[in-house]
Image (cartoon, rainbow, N blue to C red):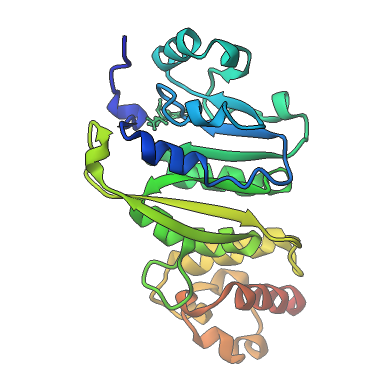
Amino acid sequence: MTVKAKKHLGQHFLNDESVAQKIADTLSLQGYQNVLEIGPGMGVLTKYLVKKNITTYVIEIDPESVTYLKANYLNLAPRILEQDFLKYDLNTVFKNQPFAIIGNFPYNISSQIVFKALKMRNQIPEFSGMFQKEVAQRICSKEGSKIYGILSVLTQAFYEAEYLFTVPPNVFSPPPKVDSGVLRLTRKEDFSLPCDETLFFKVVKTGFQQRRKTLRNSLKTFNLSDNLKANSIFGKRPEQLSVQEFIKLTQLIAEDS
Ligand code: SAH
């Protein structure tokens, strides 16, 4: 028995055992006892995770995949969560303990997965896995790059982001239309920001809503003083600002009121 791939769930099953092993090996296993795999499907990655000296949980929305996993990974059964990762309260199982995230993720909800992980950053020291190549590159890209955006800044404010390797479509069934990319996020030693974190998220998101405009224009809704807007940082476009400069910008905006 195998699971029939369902398009609306972003199912592209990986067929290449060496790629699966390589992805499983991206985790350092330092600083946590639990790993959560998102979207295990038929368990190609899970198989390598359960061999490690770590407790593996999996969260899978597809009942057919869950049935398959329960039949083929008997020891895993109590740690299979048949849930939607985006909706499930992970502290039902992790109870505020740290855990790492891994997966060959469903590409249709890539950004939402990253945003949820960022919200739980206090508990997530490490995050690795596979996205559509462009998304993995975007998360890891630096200021000045065309693909630098909200995901890059918000992720790199808290994590070191490494693009690890590219995976071609032909090792999946069905093959996706795009290349895939594997990345690793390692939380920074000190991951508290020296500014109001809620305001930081708001500034970054608002700034990139109109990425061609200067920040003076795109941040109009903040009702900033003319004095502050004369600062040269407001003459830049969002894609030119490093994470550090976005922090500085947030500090300036906070002081302005
Ligand atoms: N890891 C497997 C499957 C990858 S396909 C492999 O490499 O072969 C993506 C998987 O994510 C599918 O199994 C799909 O059912 C699951 N998935 C999709 N949306 C999900 C969600 N919101 N929560 C949990 N799992 C989800």
State the residue in front, 240 or 99. Answer: 99
Say which quarter of the image contains residue 212. Answer: bottom left
Lateral position of residue 27 relative to residue 166, left or right: right
| Percent coordinates x, y for residue 119 in the rendering | 65, 46
Residue 229 position in % (x across, y down) = 60, 86
Residue 27 visible here:
yes
Q: Position of residue 39 (x, y in %)?
A: 46, 29
Count of numbered circles in the view: 0
Q: Choose between 221 and 208: the one closer to the eye.
A: 208
Q: Residue at x 23, y 36 (%)?
A: 175
Quadrant position of the C terminus in the picture: bottom right
Determine the quadrant in which ligand 1 lies: top left
- Horizontally, residue 104 falls left or right of residue 153, namely left
Position of 86 relative to 163 (above/below)? above
Q: Which residue is rendered at x = 44% and y = 24% of the image?
A: 43
**Vertical placement of 122 versus 17: above or below?**
below
Q: Quadrant of residue 138?
A: bottom left
Q: Residue at x 76, y 69 (%)?
A: 194
33 lies left or right of 35: right
Quadrant of the drawing holding the N terminus: top left
x 70%, y 24%: residue: 93
Does residue 92 lie above or below 78 as drawn? below
Q: Is residue 176 visible?
A: no
List x then y, in percent, for residue 42.
40, 21
